[in-house]
Image: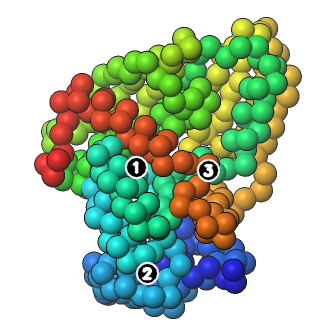
Amino acid sequence: MGKLKMAVMGAGNIAACMAKTIAQMDNVERYAVGSRSLEKAEGFAKEHGFQKAYGSYEELAADEEIELVYIATPHSEHYENARLCILHGKPVLCEKAFTANAGQARELFALAEAKGVFITEAIWVRYMPMLDQIRRELASGSIGEATLLTANLGYPISHVPRMRRPDLAGGALLDVGVYPLNFAMMMFGNRIREISGICTYTDTGVDEQNSFALVFEDGKVAQLNSSMLCNSDRRGMIFGTKGYMQIDNINNFERFTVHDAGGRILRQVERPEQISGYEYEVEACIRALEEGKLECEKMPHAESIRVMELTDSLRKQWGIRYPFE
């Protein structure tokens, strides 16, 4: 392939982060942007160097030149946006949370398979090279057998309108909590026997802070927290029979530190230089498309569905149901 002609659906902050990233990638072309507002799309295109701007998602999806669409719209819109792209034969890189619920995820993957269209979830930490380093360290036995994990992520973002709106699948869980959840699954796997949690609510009825626990079939335990009210240290800790690991920034790995049982540092590994971290998911898409695959091995379809099943389970426990469900 030559330069991949990439389009961005949505023109908000996350879309801007992706635009700034691909601007520094030699194998990607900033081709098109789509928004519900032509004025907003044209402003985004001008600011970030995209060739074309569309005032509707339908027009964007119909452009035959596009080779990959990055969906950066609210969670509530992912299903319809991705479905539109698939029906137009456009490969999709869809932001997390992949959909609002597991049913939507299953439908999208089934449609994509039937149409022979590539689609994957843009949960960026899944694609980062440092993930492989952390997993190798765990497998080496340097901290013995890992049995317990904790992770948290919090940002003071409750003032952002979409975060409080049930009709946009708002709340801390789908926006922030999916990172601790994915972290636990990346380290301990997806064979989860039990999930339980608690939350507090906004006046609109979505979760504003939550704490939940996973019990894995092999006896491992993960305790996870997320919030849209406060900043957290974004730290992940993995405790083993011979020591423990500290992972700084589970949302964009910065470094990991290995300690022995007495707390002494055995080694510290810094992340490699990167553009933003978004480039790895784009590169994974390019490789998959070149190889004719319909999913990325870094984030298989089954894993995206499993994540949504777990968030569905928590929302059911908390009595949170979105109006469109």
Q: Give the residue at x 81% y 37%.
A: 269
Q: Secondary structure at mark 1?
A: loop
Q: Which comes sooner in the sequence, label 2 or label 1?
A: 2
Viewer-side residue, 243 vs 7: 7
- Mark 3–mark 1 CB contact (< 8 Å): no
Q: CA distance from mark 2 to mark 1?
A: 21 Å
| Numbered circle sitting on residue 33 | 2
Amino acid type shown at disc 3: Glu
Can you identify the residue that label 3 sits on?
297
Mark 1: few/some/many CA within 10 Å (<14, 14-19, 20+): many
At 56% from the left and 44% from the top, the residue drawn is: 251
**First along the sequence among labels 3 and 1:** 1
- The numbered disc on residue 97 is 1
- Tell me: 34 left or right of 235: left
Instruction: Say left or right for 35 vs 120.
Output: left
Expressed as whole percent of the image width and height from the top left, the position of residue 6 reads: 54, 78
